[in-house]
Image: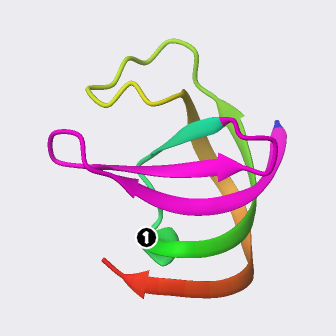
């Protein structure tokens, strides 16, 4: 289990991919991203597990399965 604080982005590869860009600059692809996280610009705290045995079309970073999250700041624009 890891905890990551960062911002939500939507990457435009293929059909698109939801990403969490951590404060340290690391990018995580959010697999099966919860609907409430699908807002560009949210600052969030996410608890989850890394999924090392999954490949995605976007290949933007490690795949993170979200177990729980907290919205810290909402500077979003709805996608």
Label 1 element class: loop
**Residue lying farthest top?**
53
Q: Is residue 44 above or below residue 66?
A: below
From the viewer's perspective, is residue 57 above or below residue 4? above
Magenta segment: 2-26
The answer to whether residue 43 is above or below residue 75 is above
Residue 64, horizontal then vertical, whole percent: 59, 38
Q: Position of residue 26 (x, y in %)?
A: 69, 35
What residue would you read off at disc 1?
38
Crowding at mark 1 (Cα within 10 Å: few <14, some 14-19, many 20+): many
User: Is 54 a magenta residue?
Assistant: no
Q: Is 67 rendered above or below residue 70?
A: above
User: On the picture, is 11 further left or further right than 49?
Assistant: left
Main SS, magenta region, reads strand
x then y, percent, for residue 59: 39, 24
Answer with the quarter of the image where residue 60 lies: top left
Question: Residue at the location (60% across, 86% down)?
Answer: 75
Q: On the rendered image, what quadrant is the N terminus found in? A: top right
């Amino acid at each position: 289990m890891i905890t990551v604080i960062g911002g939500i982005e939507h990457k435009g590869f293929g059909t698109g991919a939801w990403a969490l860009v951590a404060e340290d600059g690391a990018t995580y692809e959010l697999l099966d991203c919860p609907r409430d996280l699908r807002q560009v610009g949210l600052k969030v705290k996410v608890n989850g597990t890394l999924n090392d045995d999954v490949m995605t079309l976007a290949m933007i970073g490690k795949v993170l399965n979200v177990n729980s999250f907290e919205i810290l700041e909402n500077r979003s624009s709805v996608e």
